[in-house]
Amino acid sequence: MLIHPIRLSTFVLLGLFISKADPDRPVQPPPAAQSQNQPQQQANPAADPMKQATRLANITRDWMNGKLSTPGTSAEMREVSRTNNHGQLMVIYNVFISGAPKDQTYNLAVWPVTAAGPSESSRGLSIAPNGLLICAGRAPGQCVGEKKDDPVDFAFPAAKGEVFRLALVAADGSAKILFAVVPDPIIKKDRGCSLEAIRLLPKFELVLVRAQGFQPNEELQFTSKSEDEPKENQAKADPEGGYTTALLPFVKNKQIGKADIKLKGAACAPSLSFEWGK
């Protein structure tokens, strides 16, 4: 059974998923000097753009890290195929679930960057004995595929750096598994450290910057240049040697551009570039 990560209903589920967001380790807000321009597309235009950006980045970070899932559960996405048709990348995955009850059916919610929040997409999914997510088609309430125990194929037409957030919720509410994938990541590495730019809005109006591999709690130097606007900020790694921040790369009076970012620590300094407005 093939599932495309598109919004199929208006059943908004965000409140259900973010109840366990980690307030003790917030994403650092966008540097003030870099965020004078609001993202061009907002879930709530009346909201403070700085608070909105930080909140969305926090939720996405915890969603990707599995911190919003039922303890002991996890999802692994295994790539099935990767094709490029006239410049459009399409990646298909199977999903394997660990730690969740197999005697339940599950509802699927998806949250693409084009939507303000997650929405229900499919019902009646099952977990096979090996953990594979399937449409069993064997009992009432189970989704039906092309055959019995049909594996669910997740198809993602992905742009550079675009994140797709997904969630499985047991029909009886006993478990929820939140996971995400970036099929075409923008990530660079340097001497054991990595730096990644994740697209949170369709034209890169908002970016989640994620880094790993630095020394625990070490002082860092974060530099960025969006078109002709260079900025520099002091930062600090978390106790696990990671760092996350939200970035608003758009500059005044421009619809497209390029951003360069770099995060420098004592032993490494990964850097990368991405184009916004596309």
Image: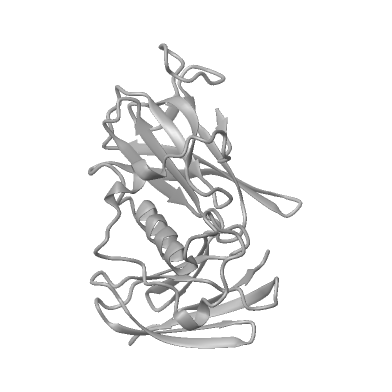
In the rendered image, is residue 197 in sight?
no
Q: Judge from the rendering whether residue 113 lies leftward or rightward of residue 169; answer left or right.
A: right
Q: Is residue 139 above or below residue 64?
A: above
Quadrant in the picture for residue 168: top left
- The quarter of the image holding the N terminus is top right
List x then y, in percent, for residue 110. 49, 41
Q: Judge from the rendering whether residue 3 lies leftward or rightward of residue 190; answer left or right.
A: right
Residue at far front of view: 46
Say which residue appears at 34% left-offset and 48% top-offset: 18
List x then y, in percent, for residue 206. 53, 65
Q: Is residue 225 above or below residue 89?
A: below
Q: Judge from the rendering whether residue 103 lies leftward or rightward of residue 41; answer left or right.
A: left
Say which residue appears at 33% left-offset and 72% top-offset: 213
In the rendered image, is residue 199 in sight?
yes
- The quarter of the image holding the C terminus is bottom right
* Along the line of sight, the residue nearer the viewer: 54 or 84: 54
Say which residue appears at 29% left-offset and 52% top-offset: 67
List x then y, in percent, for residue 120. 48, 34
Say which residue appears at 70% left-offset and 71% top-offset: 255
